[in-house]
């Protein structure tokens, strides 16, 4: 058994995995038309879709493709779904309306399946384990997925691998559990490992982790700590902080002591959240 990065020629295997993960023939036809496997193969062969080969792993058993997993950062759902639906609309003439299945803050396991001839050999568990290790090695905080409440076998598999329920969703008319698995690495390790941030962002976030709860620092002082002459550059790095609030960008203030910004906003709910975080930390430190 080997588990490898997918190639473009694996598109049909990825499409089969997605179809098996959805499982319901009626839902598949509603989503992609009667020739759904061909449509899903076109989606998987594209570079920037939810089911792209660029976001998949392939499991081979005795030299044959036996299964696949496809996943993506939940923060990218909107843009990836648009390109996915563009292809579906071009192939079928219809554009399905699909509920959100994930969101920012989790790396979303969209589909995982082992082809029927290879089942009963523990390959699904091996593929799931390898996938989780890969994503956590890259620095992501948590992996999320949804599983049909009427599929207890899959539910047991995920929970046996450390996934826990965090909510419920309705998807394709099915009641689903929303499960997540947390990274085994602490925040400093995750920032150090992350391959989806720049080296400058890494320096800023690691420096910020040294600011204790109940304390604050200015954008310009933080810039000096990381050897940068631009407080604005630090502000931009904090605006793109994917680890908030664990990397506590709420502890950074403007030079005049005002709130500055938070989560890319300079007013409204984001600023109020920043005030509340600072207030709670100050109370705990007293």
Image: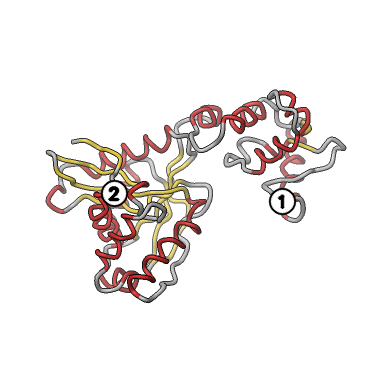
Residue furthest to the right: 256
Q: Rounded to the nearest whole Å, what is the CA distance between mark 1 and mark 2? A: 39 Å
Horizontal side, residue 228 vs residue 154: left or right = right
* Residue 43 numbered tag: none
Choose top left, top right, bottom left or bottom right for residue 248. Answer: top right
**Residue 173: in sight, yes or no?**
no
Between marks 1 and 2 in the image, the one whose residue lies nearer the viewer: 2
Choose top left, top right, bottom left or bottom right for residue 45. Answer: bottom left
Say whether marks 1 and 2 touch (CB < 8 Å): no
Residue 160 % position (x, y): 32, 42
Residue 48 % position (x, y): 42, 53
Identified at 48% across, 34% down, the residue is: 195
State the quadrant of the C terminus.
Answer: top right
Horizontal side, residue 172 vs residue 283: left or right = left
- Out of 65 and 25, give the one closest to the viewer: 65
> Which secondary structure lies at badge 1?
loop
Residue 145 % position (x, y): 40, 52
Horizontal side, residue 115 vs residue 270: left or right = left
Residue behind mark 2: 8
Choose top left, top right, bottom left or bottom right for residue 125. Answer: top left
Residue 49 % position (x, y): 40, 56
Against 7, residue 267 (above or below) is below
Identified at 77% across, 41% down, the residue is: 279
- Out of 278 and 99, give the one closest to the viewer: 99
> Which secondary structure lies at badge 2?
helix
Residue behind mark 1: 265
State the quadrant of the N terminus.
Answer: top left
Identified at 19% across, 41% down, the residue is: 60
Way the structure is coloured: secondary structure
């Amino acid at each position: 058994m080997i588990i490898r990065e997918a190639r473009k020629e694996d598109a049909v295997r990825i499409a089969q995995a997605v179809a098996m993960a959805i499982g319901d023939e009626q839902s598949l036809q509603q989503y992609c038309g009667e020739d759904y496997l061909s449509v899903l193969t076109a989606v998987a062969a594209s570079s920037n879709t939810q089911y792209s080969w660029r976001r998949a792993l392939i499991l081979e058993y005795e030299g044959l493709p036996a299964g696949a997993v496809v996943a993506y950062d939940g923060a990218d759902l909107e843009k990836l779904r648009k390109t996915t639906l563009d292809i579906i609309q071009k192939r079928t003439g219809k554009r399905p309306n699909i509920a959100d299945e994930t969101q920012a803050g989790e790396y979303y396991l969209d589909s995982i399946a082992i082809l029927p001839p290879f089942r009963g050999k523990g390959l699904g568990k091996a593929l799931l384990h390898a996938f989780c290790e890969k994503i956590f090695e890259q620095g992501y905080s948590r992996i999320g997925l949804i599983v049909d409440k009427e599929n207890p076998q899959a539910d047991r598999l995920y929970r046996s691998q450390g996934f826990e329920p965090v909510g419920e969703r309705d998807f394709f008319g099915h009641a689903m559990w929303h499960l997540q698995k947390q990274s085994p690495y602490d925040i400093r390790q995750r920032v150090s490992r992350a391959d989806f941030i720049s080296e400058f962002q890494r320096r800023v976030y690691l420096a910020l982790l040294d600011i204790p709860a109940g304390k604050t620092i200015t954008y310009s002082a933080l810039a000096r700590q990381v050897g940068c002459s631009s407080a604005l550059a630090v502000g931009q790095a904090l605006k793109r902080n994917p680890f908030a609030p664990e990397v506590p960008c709420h502890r950074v203030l403007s030079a005049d002591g005002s709130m500055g910004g938070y989560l890319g906003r300079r007013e409204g709910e984001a600023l109020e959240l920043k005030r509340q975080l600072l207030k709670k930390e100050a109370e705990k430190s007293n």
